[in-house]
Image (cartoon, helix red, strand yellow):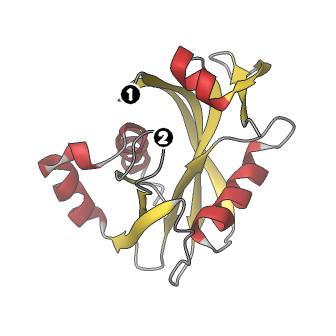
Amino acid sequence: MTEHVILVTPDDVPVGVHGKQGAHVDGLLHRAFSVFVVDSSGRLLLQQRAWTKYHSAGLWSNTCCSHPRPGESTAAAAQRRLFEEMGFNCPIETAFSFVYRADVGGGLIEHEYDHVFIGRFDGDPAPDAAEVADWRWITPRELEREMRERPDRFTYWFRVAYAELRSRDLS
């Protein structure tokens, strides 16, 4: 079954739907979300994307990210995918949104209106191995050092969203 994404204007107004793969080939602007989960000591839960992902495979990223389905609210999609990918639920709240466009290799372009959510959770996830190769809790200091030394190990959207998150001090 073909997955679809919601095409949007730069102001996040829906203008149609398109097959997910085709939207990434054509670089069409579509709605997405990124969830950042922190624990009570301020550590961020990262996931390493599964090696079988069609782009950005094996790269470290935020706790969960995906696209809402047509007719699904972005917040509901973020909750759904957090459970599907990481195996837990927690309350999330809207933090901010941003638009980015990036070549992610293999002839694919991420062009997304990304809604960022923040959640709080203490515990260990139970990730789906088809979605997540690995996971870890990391302090902001450790993460920033790693990102300075090896930015190529992290997804493009994560680097952009994390910089904005830190500038807003929302963690």
Q: Is residue 161 above or below residue 99?
A: below
Estimate the x, y position of residue 166 in percent, counting from the top left. Answer: 37, 50
Judged left or right of residue 73, residue 162 is left
Q: How many marks?
A: 2
Helix, strand or loop at mark 1: loop
On the rendered image, what quadrant is the C terminus found in? bottom left
**Most distant residue in the left direction:** 149
Estimate the x, y position of residue 87 in percent, counting from the top left. Answer: 63, 73
Q: Is residue 88 above or below residue 149?
A: below
Residue picked out by circle 1: 106
Judged left or right of residue 90, residue 104 is left
Marking on residue 54: 2
Query: Is residue 117 in view?
Result: yes
Q: Where is residue 42, by image quadrant?
A: bottom left
Query: At 46% from the left edge and 51% from the top edge, which residue is drawn?
Result: 52
Helix, strand or loop at mark 2: loop
Q: Amino acid at mark 1?
A: Gly
Estimate the x, y position of residue 12 in percent, counting from the top left. Answer: 69, 24
Estimate the x, y position of residue 3 in percent, counting from the top left. Answer: 72, 37
Q: Is residue 134 above or below residue 149?
A: below
Query: Is residue 35 in view?
Result: no
Query: At 70% from the left edge and 20% from the top edge, which residue is drawn?
Result: 8
Marking on residue 74: none
Q: Do the residues bearing badges 2 and 1 touch, measured as CB atoms within 8 Å? A: yes
